[in-house]
Amino acid sequence: MTGEMAMRWPGRAVRRLDAALGPGGLRDASVLAAVFVISRVAAVLAGVAFETGPLQASIQNIDPALLRTHLLQSLWYLHGQPPLWNLLVGLSLKALPSAWPTFWHLAYMVMGFIQGQALLRLLRLLGAGRRTGLTVAALVTAFPATIAFENSFSYDYPTFVLATLVPLAAARFVQRPTFGRGLTSFSLAAALVLLRTLFQAWWIVAVVAIMLLACARHRRVVLVAAALPLALVAGVYAKNWLMYDVAGTTSWTGMGLARSVVVGLPLSERRALVAEGKLHRVSLVKPFSPLADYLAVGVTPARPTGIPILDEATGPEFPINMENKTFIAISRQYWQDDLWIVRHRPASYLGAIRRALGDFFSSATSGWEGHGNVARLGGYNRFVDEAAYGQLGLGRVGLFGVIAYLLAIGAGLVAIVRRLRQDASAAMVATAVALVTILNVVVVGNLAEVGENYRFRFVIDPLALALATVGARELLVRLRSQRRAV
């Protein structure tokens, strides 16, 4: 390359990037990048630090000692969670024994930067407008909840990032249906299923169905690109079915639902129902309790298998091993009790759903209870909860959040009913995938569990804000047109 060409190359690259991002796209991306850097520097100055405590506390994690010494064996016998998160954590513990916190901190920051840029492009694609799209993307990037989850070592933040990337990747495939773009899109979707139990096979099948409908002339490319990601998901399902008779990526369905259904009944009533033989004795124990609590009420432990992850009750670095094989039987007993209560005490279950929705629409930072990084964010977090989210003295529920979700779901449903068909636009496909993702989390999360539903909502907040923004914009345009017509 000559000196003259070397001088021209950066300018050409910038012009090509600006053209790819659309009018003003490079400028907006640069502004958003500045917002990201400034907000993260401010967070560090406020004392925000990367929290690694969840590694030893979150029940979704395999005992770190087993990740270091029995990684592949533990992943193979895993039954309570899909394998991707523990695979990544285990590899980092092996490769970077002392530096893994630094690695993940940097990785989360990179993911946060990518998520913000992806949300900006998604908003532009959906038609939010330059200024509006940049404002919404900047707010999400700098929200205290985003910063708090970005600095907490759990699978919530990767889920948050992937949930934003999937609709955008689907839209890019529709714009140019190549095998590479299709494989990227479906691999991101499969990663969500293999990362988080909120996303099961029906969700990725719905995503594939949307793509097949919209890309009717490229269905072969869709099917070929989706084959490997779907095979990976199917493989986990088949393994769990053959080994544990579990239809899904988790054996904890009964326990999760029990947090809503069983716990919704007063303990005195549960004791009476157990005495009558209508409920199992597991329903006297709080779901996801240590194994010793279940053994104390007469649960028979599973026979030793010789496999550490299936046999240990606790570990040297872990308080509760929910992958102990006994929990499969415990969860099934909870499931039977869940069904009995739903049939015979439906009012109790409806009350649990109401509590779940209240938790779902509470502040995404409420899990910290004002401690740790959320305490360091202090007044900024409280301001956002009140001014941006709408906690206006009406309890924990954020009124503006409820309105945004109603608007997002309504606008999304209207859009797909009217415009989702063969040869649908990239924006329409992104809308449909985003809506399916939102509905999946709202319905599955709130019907199946109560307790930390604000974490469920956090991962789809960018999608809900995107659809709500576009829906509000279209609504305002129609109202102005009607006024002019009058």
Image: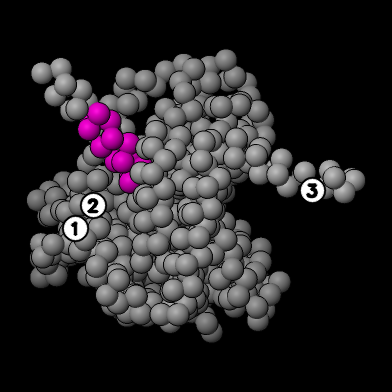
Viewer-proximal residue, 339 or 232?
A: 232
Q: Which mark is residue 439?
A: none
Is residue 398 toward the left or the right of residue 330 in the image? left
> Which circle's residue, 1 or 2, is located before the other in the chain?
1
Q: CA distance from mark 1 to mark 2?
A: 7 Å
Instruction: Tell me, yes or no, whether the two marked residues, 1 and 2, touch with CB atoms within 8 Å.
Output: yes
Give the crowd class for mark 2: few <14, some 14-19, many >=20 residues within 10 Å. Answer: many
Q: Is residue 346 visible?
A: yes
Which residue position holds label 2?
401
Q: CA distance from mark 3 to mark 2?
A: 49 Å
Give me the residue at 31% from left, 32% from top: 412
Residue 459: x, y in percent? 39, 54
* Colouring chosen for the image of the structure: one colour
Is residue 453 toward the left or the right of residue 50 in the image? left
Q: Is residue 344 above or below residue 130?
A: below
Q: Give the magenta range.
A: 464-477
Q: CA distance from mark 3 to mark 1?
A: 51 Å
Give me the residue at 53% from left, 84% from top: 316
